[in-house]
Image: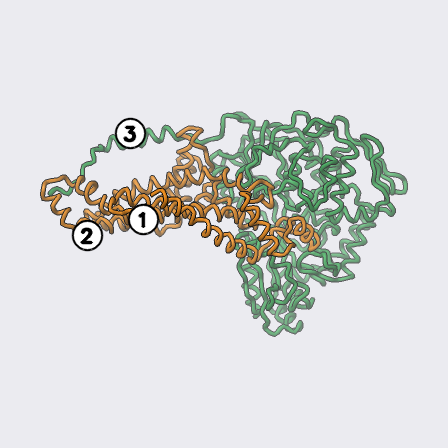
Chain colours: A orange, B green
Amino acid sequence: MFGYVVTRILSAVPVMAVVATIVFLLLHLTPGDPATIIAGEQATAAEIERIRTSLGLDRPLLQQFVGWLLRILSGDLGTSIYSGKPVTELILQRLEPTVSLALLTLSIAIVIAVPTGVIAAWKEGTWVDWTLMFLAIVFFSMPIFITGYILIYNFSVQWRMLPVQGYRSLSDGIGPFLSHMILPAISLGLVYASLLARMSRSAMLEVLHQDYIRTARAKGLGTSKVLFLHALKNAAVPIITTIGIGLILLISGVVVVESVFAIPGIGRLTVDAILRRDYPIIQGVILFFSFVYVIINLLIDLTYRLVDPRIKY
Amino acid sequence: MSKRLDFGFSRRAIAAATIGIGLGIAGPGLAADETTLKAVMFTDLAITDPTFTASTITSNFGFMVYDTLFALDSKGEPKPQMVDKFEKSADGLTWTFTLRDGLKWHDGTPVTADDAVASIKRWAKVDSLGKALMGATTSFEPVDQKTFKLVLSKPFPLVLEAFAKTSAYTPFIYQKSFAETAPSQAKTKVVGSGPFIFLDEEWRPGNKVVFRKNPNYVPRSDPQDGLAGAKVPKVDKVEWITISDPNTAIAALQNGEIHYLDNPLMDLVPMLEKDPDLKVLRIDPMGQSGMIRPNHMQKPFSDPKARLGLAKLVDQAMLGAAGGVPQNYFTACYSFLGCGTPLSTERGADGFKKQNVAEAKELFASAGYKGEKIVVLQPTDVPVLSNPTEALVQAMRSAGLNVEAQAMDWGTLTSRRTNKGPVGEGGWSLFLTTGFTSGFGSPLTHTYLQSSCEVGTAAGWPCDKELQGIIDQFQTAATRDEQKQLADKLNEVAYKVLPYVPYGQMPVLAAYRNELKGVQASGIGVFYGISIAKE
């Protein structure tokens, strides 16, 4: 088991090397130039050139790439072209809000989706099933920013119950933390919960028609025990897979939610960096995300073993 | 078998839990510390060196932490700011300036004439007006701790205007050690002498910028007037919070989470004006001017007739409306020197005040246009430019032009427009942009007017010796009458050359909560002189 984990983590290195190369080339071949953005709207060609030279962007691409790789190998992701702050520091500053948002969203989604999927499967073909799945389609189809605006308008502007924007750390207290995170987490969570609910329903339907479920019912077990102890556990593997994939998809959703609710997370950092062509930040964040993806996939694989002891590594 | 699930939660328990959560997390409001002013600016601060970048937000940052030798009052006249007194020799060639008493850097050391001279020299390496000033300068040196002298080789009537320049690049005064760095090297250590101190350790790029009141700042004795006069910080802290979504920013202002919103979304301004808790102020009444910039190096707009045809297609009011600017905030403006500026004139614009598609068609035909592709760059991430671009494209198509609007983000556009090649090789035909009207007041500082035929001009590269000759004459035009005569001539020639086509003017607004007192139309969102009334 330990050997398996180490091998998987080491396998991240070539993955990240390929990602690093592709990202570097794509970024530098994409139109857009930080020098023109820094120089400002009314800059002349001479001023743009002056800045390009000072940033080292006039050097040959290969020279820039080798320099960047050498820095990465020494653990240095570089500094922002604009603020001059280290990329590692910027990512670490933004990590907590994004991780908090992702975990709260995940919790909300699981709490909503799994029971919804179970109930829909249990009530298969009835109005309950149809209603729940209809709602799942509606929430899945609704753009996250629309949900966000609706929640802000009602809970913040109209009823003045919750703040519109910003982030408060958990260390400031559970109240301030939740008051700032609940609306973003619901906005994002509804999409994710819809996906998860549909997947849970499908997985449950397969299991509910198995003989051992009929046996469990025949021996007089209560409905909730049959559903949650027998059926759900056996339907867990595809649900966990969906949770894992959803967590990866969630990172892209985080970008939108962080913009709408002005949460200073990694998603915003990435978008701002892309719009400004702040190459070191974009490269650093994508490398970081590729590592996160590898780790999430590893955790999913390890979780399979917890719910299905037949799986061995 | 029963199909009813019983999870053991009563409706009453759920209701109680809901209310409990509600009580625990409600009450957003502003922090108890009422001397922290929270503002959302029009964009996020990325660079702190105002001589490294011409970015407007960096210039705004400069007005918080640095100071200038002179500053413009509300009438646009330069007034002494760091300077206590100055003398001009009878021939106008020797200027002697003396700094005010008590000026100190944020680290406690005194501001000296050495600092001022080194800062102006750094600024003059990048700024067009600064370069012109230094071109007319024989020597510029400190005399003693507080005095410095400027000796000119020829009369330069815009010395004070140059030192009071507000549009980028602004001549802020830095510590000598900072100012001796080449302007191509961005400095990140900020030690100013202005009314607020930048707290670098609290700066979170993309999230917030924090300033603390400078307790040692010695303001002028004359009252605040525009950017001139006393700069008295009246709050303990100012926080610039980044909210990139303009709708969220407005909701945050309405909800009382921020006090001040710079440049709110124009089409939502009527809604803000109806909110009894808010005020909307024209912080810069002259605001921004719209410009349609054709590429003078490539067909069809290398031909002046095609540019005239383009100008005939422009309906300024329609483009303003497309940009979401409410009618009462939009000014159709036919002056290349901006409307509301001292030299504003509409000479030569008579034939361009009404859209005339038929005439435009004729002009394009006489320019030899035969349906070649015209590439319009459309920055979809900047709605105030993207939507008017869409409207202009429709107008051009109505004249039978073969127009391709290419959607891209602003970052791509700024890079793409540096391509001087034909459209088949990644080139372009036109794009829309805006500029601060205050910078248009003098032709010498108006980048998009420059038509010098040199490599260094801004993208679009107009080339007209007559127009450039008139612009250059402003360096020596000593009296206002002389300048006005030149301005008339300039506008007339500009409407023949059309370095760009003007498409109207809109103010820069600020929306703020009623508890803010002392907000002034200073032209730039500065936060000295503003206090927060206790409710």
- Give the structural element (helix, strand or loop) at label 3: helix
Q: Amino acid at mark 1?
A: Thr
Query: Residue, x 30% and y 49% (percent of image)?
Result: A136
Tag on residue B16? 3
Q: Position of residue B121 (x, y in %)?
A: 77, 42
- Expressed as whole percent of the image width and height from the top left, the position of residue B347 reads 73, 57
> Residues under labels 2 and 3: Cα distance?
34 Å
Residue A250 seen in the current view: no
CA distance separating discs 1 and 3: 36 Å
Q: Say if residue A230 shows up in the picture.
A: yes
Look at 55% across and 29% down and name the residue there: B36
Of all chains, the one bearing label 3 is B
**B472 or A184: nearer the eye?**
A184
Nearer the observer, B354 or A152: A152
Return the residue at label 1: A241
Of all residues shown, which one is farthest toward the right? Answer: B90
In the rendered image, residue B312, in percent from the top left (x then y), is placed at 63, 64
